[in-house]
Amino acid sequence: MLSKLMTVFAPEAPDYGDDRLAIAGLMVRLARSDGTYAASEITRIDRLLAARYGLTAAEAAALRIEAEDYEANAPDTVRFTRAIKENVPLDERFAVVEDLWDVVLEDGVRDESEDALMRLLANLLGINDRDSALCRQRVLARRNPK
């Protein structure tokens, strides 16, 4: 009986196996990692989510808002990367890392905390430092075409 009461009154735990929420949560975690969460970063996250999943602007914003709560309550980063590794093939994770770099580069400043978190995330996603740097270079090339 006590277990039934617990399920009724306990808040619903986030689904740490949802790769969409995990990717959005990592974007939010990266944007917040330098101590600021700028409007431009929020806009960039919404655009990336809309493009990645074919969402409307409102749907992307709703996913980001859900991810903000998910990120704030997640006890560690491994939960995010585990969900991604379990659901996103390695060859598609390169695009995930590019999107993460896109968030980092949005404010024009590469903070040490963002760089450190990106090194960790790429590694946890199975992407080595060299390939992560290539992902960053592709993002920079798209942002600054010659």
Image (cartoon, grey):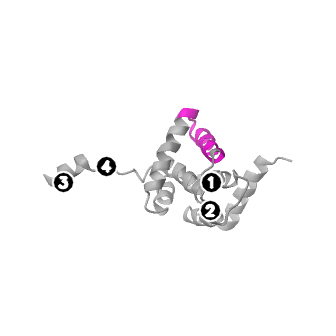
Q: Residue furthest left?
A: 1
- Asked if residue 55 lies in the magenta stretch, the reply is yes
Neighbour tally class for label 4: few under 14, some 14-19, many 20 plus, Cα within 10 Å: few
Residue 68 drawn at (x, y percent): 50, 49
Q: Is residue 38 left or right of residue 12?
A: right
- Counting residues from the start of the chain, the first of labels 4 and 2 encountered is 4
Q: Is residue 34 left or right of residue 133?
A: left
- Counting residues from the start of the chain, the first of labels 2 and 3 encountered is 3
Give yes or no for contact between labels 2 and 1 (Cβ–Cβ under 8 Å).
yes
For label 4, the residue is: 11
- Picture layout, residue 122 above or below residue 27: below
- Counting residues from the start of the chain, the first of labels 3 and 1 encountered is 3
What is the CA distance from the residue labelled 2 to the residue labelled 1? 8 Å
Q: Amino acid at mark 3?
A: Ser
Mark 3: which secondary structure? helix
Closer to the camera in the image, 139 or 107: 107
Residue 132 drawn at (x, y percent): 67, 61
Depth check, mark 4 against mark 3: the one in front is 4
- Asked if residue 76 lies in the magenta stretch, the reply is no
Which residue corresponds to the image point at 43% horizontal and 52% vertical from the top-left?
A: 17
Q: Residue furthest right?
A: 146
Neighbour tally class for label 2: few under 14, some 14-19, many 20 plus, Cα within 10 Å: many
* Magenta stretch: dominant secondary structure: helix
Give yes or no for contact between labels 3 and 1 (Cβ–Cβ under 8 Å).
no
The image's mark for residue 100 is: 1
Q: Is residue 31 left or right of residue 109?
A: left
The magenta-colored residue range is 40-58
Closer to the camera in the image, 117 or 16: 117
For label 2, the residue is: 118
What is the CA distance from the residue labelled 4 to the residue labelled 1? 30 Å
What is the CA distance from the residue labelled 4 to the residue labelled 3? 13 Å
For label 3, the residue is: 3
